[in-house]
Amino acid sequence: MRSELKVAFLTSTDPTDKTAWSGIHYQMFKALKEQRIQITAIGPVWDKLPRAIIYILDKISRALFKKRYNKAQNLILSFWYAFFFKLKLKINKFDLIFVPVGSTQIAFLNTELPIYYYGDTSFSQINGYYPEFSNLISFSNWESEYIENKSLNKTHVRIYASEWAANHVINHYKMPKDKTFVVPFGANINDHIPIFNSAKLKDPICRLLFLGVDWKRKGGDIAYDTLVHLNNKGIETELTVVGCTPPVEHPKMLIIPFLNKNNTSDYQKFSLIFKQTHFLLMPTRAECAGIIYGEASAFYVPSLATNTGGVSSVIENGVNGFMLDFEAKAESYSAIIEKYFLDKDRYRTFALNAHKKYKNELNWEHWAKKIINIIEDTLKK
């Protein structure tokens, strides 16, 4: 059956573009293609005109009402996509449509084909959870929820990156439990699997990594306080910050405002940083999935994060990291770091187990196999 499956991969972006949606669409499309199915990309869709209109609406809403307008989920984009995807679906005969994070793309799409939807959250869950989906004007709240509900009711099967996201659509949108599944994201690294850097076991400096564009949402203040606390305790520690410019400074903090993993030179820097890192420190305030934790595991780096959102579907306590309570402060993060950093044998086991979790669960090949198995088990039901 597998080789006979004809799948339409529906995205508004170009899934052969490594920069689209942080490379996630590219990795998904590539991984599914490697499962020997007949998969066709029916994106991208040109959408500069509707996006320009939406940009203006957001500006007006902010100026007049001090409220945001949801630029990702709205009727303008949704009707636009429905028109063009209906045309694109006529280019070939398909058995099903696979839609990664595309409620806006399918809400008004008229098709008889079964839709398999993959996501990491839904509107009512992220509304008020992420800053960019907070303080929306009331009409934007209404149309976003309308689009989410309408798109979910068009799907044959729903697959989510975490139990957190899946349970929400089951409970809030009343989606059937037997047609809702969980398959975590893979790690966005290249095909070369790293080897363990045993030299860092002899490194007298504890090297921490904070990686993200949003210092506040990712818990940067707690990461900074942890750096200060460890050094005050006499444990020489350095914190590398990648992806943003923090509002604070410290002589033991290295700042790299931007790295493009699609650039060979930048990816080599990214890889080298991870190989030298002892812990990924991300005390995030809000997180839907957290692909970065899988990437850390691939590089033998345990993660320290907050038990929030979908993090628990990626981090397994004591295996590839630890999740701390939302209220946890620098002292709690420091205690775990000290315990493992000072015991080299304990740390080595921790690092090797993190990589094992990546190889067994947190890679795109495993993700694609799980997706295909779900399709084969549910397509005729």
Image (cartoon, rainbow, N blue to C red):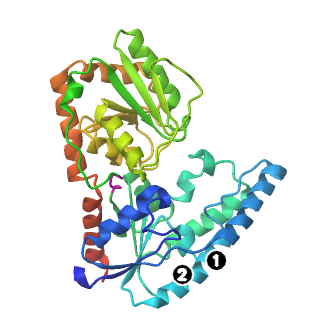
Q: Quadrant of the C terminus?
A: bottom left
What residue sits 57% from the left and 69% below the top? 104
Examine the rendering and report whether any part of residue 243 can be seen.
Answer: yes
Examine the rendering and report whether any part of residue 110 can be seen.
Answer: no
Check disc 1 and report the residue beneath it: 79
* Image location (x, y in percent) of residue 89: 48, 86
Tell me the SS state at disc 1.
helix
Q: Say which quarter of the image contains residue 86.
A: bottom right
The reply, left or right, for residue 67 in relation to residue 116 is right
The reply, left or right, for residue 87 in relation to residue 262 is right
What secondary structure prevails in the magenta region? loop
Q: Pick whichever, 59 or 209, lies toward us.
A: 209
What residue sits 53% from the left and 41% below the top? 213
Q: Say which quarter of the image contains residue 27.
A: bottom left
Highlighted range, magenta: 184-188
Give neighbour class at mark 2: few <14, some 14-19, many 20+ (Cα, 10 Å): many
* Image location (x, y in percent) of residue 293: 35, 43
- First in sequence: mark 1 or mark 2? 1
Check disc 2 and report the residue beneath it: 85
Residue 135 vs 28, above or below: the answer is above
| Amino acid tagged 1 | Phe
What residue sits 19% from the left and 45% below the top? 356
Q: Say which quarter of the image contains residue 375.
A: bottom left
Tell me the SS state at disc 2.
helix
Q: Pick whichever, 269 or 191, lies toward us.
A: 269
What residue sits 54% from the left and 35% below the top? 215
Q: Residue furthest front?
A: 265
